[in-house]
Image: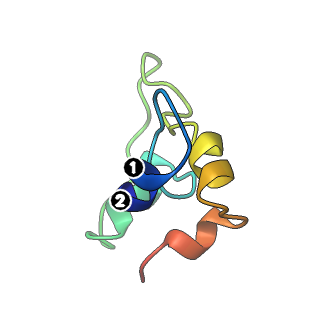
Amino acid sequence: MILAAAKSEATGIMNIGGPRNSLEEYARRTRPDIKTIPKPEWVPEDTSLDISKMKKFLKIDDEKSLVKH
């Protein structure tokens, strides 16, 4: 994806990433047994990157297709 982004017509900053995940979902990919703890107030609800520019220039319709299982 990085090479495709570099070869694209896009200029400026482009976030490269996958679909939105909570921190817990992300952690469970490698540690399915992880225990949930309360989120501190200072931790934002959504820390996802805006990948709309990546999707536009790399012609990605469904970012869920980027997830490797």
Which secondary structure lies at badge 1? helix
> Could you tell whether 17 is left or right of 9 in the image?
left
Quadrant hosting residue 2: bottom left
Q: Which mark is residue 56?
A: none
User: What amino acid is at disc 2?
Assistant: Leu
Judge by depth and name the residue closer to the eye, 46 or 41.
46
Per the model, the C-alpha gap separating discs 2 and 1 is 5 Å
Q: Residue at x 48, y 72 (%)?
A: 67
Judge by depth and name the residue closer to the eye, 58 or 9.
9
Q: Is residue 40 above or below residue 14?
A: above
The residue pinned by badge 1 equals 6
Quadrant hosting residue 69: bottom left
Which secondary structure lies at badge 2? helix
Q: Residue at x 61, y 69 (%)?
A: 64
Q: Position of residue 36 (x, y in %)?
A: 39, 52
Q: Residue furthest right?
A: 61
Q: Crowdedness of circle 2 by 10 Å Cα count: few (<14), some, many (20+)?
A: few
Q: Residue at x 44, y 33 (%)?
A: 39
Judge by depth and name the residue closer to the eye, 7 or 32.
7
Mark 2 vs 1: CB contact within 8 A: yes
Q: Residue furthest top?
A: 42
User: What amino acid is at disc 1?
Assistant: Ala
Q: Crowdedness of circle 1 by 10 Å Cα count: few (<14), some, many (20+)?
A: few
> Could you tell whether 23 is left or right of 57 in the image?
left
